[in-house]
Amino acid sequence: MKRKDIMEWGIVLAVIGTLYLTGWYRPILSRIQQGVLSIGIFSPNYSLDEPIPADFSMTLLTEEGQIKSLSEYKGETILINIWATWCPPCRAELPDMKELYFTEEGQSIRWIMVSLDQKMDKAVAFFDEEEYPWEVYQPAGNLPAVFESPAVPTTFVISPHGDIVVKQEGIAEYNTKPFRELLQSLEEET
């Protein structure tokens, strides 16, 4: 290997190491994934082949340390997003979700943003910094089996009738016409 090749690899490794050690790789990867997301490559499966009954026994810890039960929102259209600050795909899909939130359809649903971060303060600070409009929750215990997923992020939509009608594992774009139409159809069912 030539001296020039060694220097080039050294610079590349130094840049990668610096990005990793400073934590800057997360926002950089997030921005790259936002660009890919905006192309429309990742679209959620807007409906399951067969709706799955939701388990309303899930308990959540609020930012203030209070325990809430998912059952408090039974009868509403609920969007549950399981995410983490350390997850670049999670960071990438949140701006699109924020845009959806400010649409008429987004206002008619209950948003449950469940952070898997070990420290709630980190998730709250991230939401505050990015000016996200939602309250941050953490699981207050184990997630019910129906909400478990090997992927982060994972998003669920529960109908007012109590069925999971969308389960999207991985990154997706939600502020789309088909997804807004799905939310409207759920609202019309009530």
Image (cartoon, grey):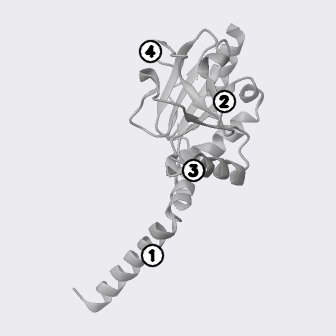
Q: Residues within 10 Å of mark 1 (few under 14, many from 20)?
A: few
Residue 69: percent from left, percent from top: 61, 22
Please name the residue shown 45% across and 67% down the image.
20
Look at the numbered discs 3 and 1 and tell me whether their residues touch, using CB distance below 8 Å. no
Q: CA distance from mark 3 to mark 1?
A: 22 Å
Q: Nearer the viewer, residue 46 or 73?
A: 73
- Relative to 117, say whether 109 is above or below: above
Tell me the residue that label 1 is attached to. Answer: 15
Look at the numbered discs 1 and 2 and tell me whether their residues touch, using CB distance below 8 Å. no
**Is label 1 in a helix, a strand or a loop?**
helix
Look at the numbered discs 2 and 3 and tell me whether their residues touch, using CB distance below 8 Å. no
In the image, is 123 to the left or to the right of 101? left
In the image, is 127 to the left or to the right of 56? right
Q: Quadrant of residue 12?
A: bottom left
Tell me the residue that label 2 is attached to. Answer: 111
Q: CA distance from mark 4 to mark 2?
A: 23 Å
Mark in the foreground, 1 or 4? 1
- Quadrant for the C terminus, please: top right
Going from the N terminus, do you reach mark 3 or mark 1 first?
Answer: 1
Mark in the foreground, 1 or 2? 2
Going from the N terminus, do you reach mark 1 or mark 4 first?
Answer: 1
Residue 182: percent from left, percent from top: 63, 20
Question: The disc labelled 3 sits on which kind of residue?
Answer: Gln
Please name the residue shown 71% across and 44% down the image.
132
Q: Is residue 178 visible in this depiction of the protein?
A: no
Going from the N terminus, do you reach mark 4 or mark 2 first?
Answer: 4
Question: The disc labelled 2 sits on which kind of residue?
Answer: Trp
Residue 167: percent from left, percent from top: 49, 25
Look at the numbered discs 4 and 3 and tell me whether their residues touch, using CB distance below 8 Å. no
Q: Nearer the viewer, residue 165 or 53?
A: 53
Going from the N terminus, do you reach mark 1 or mark 2 first?
Answer: 1
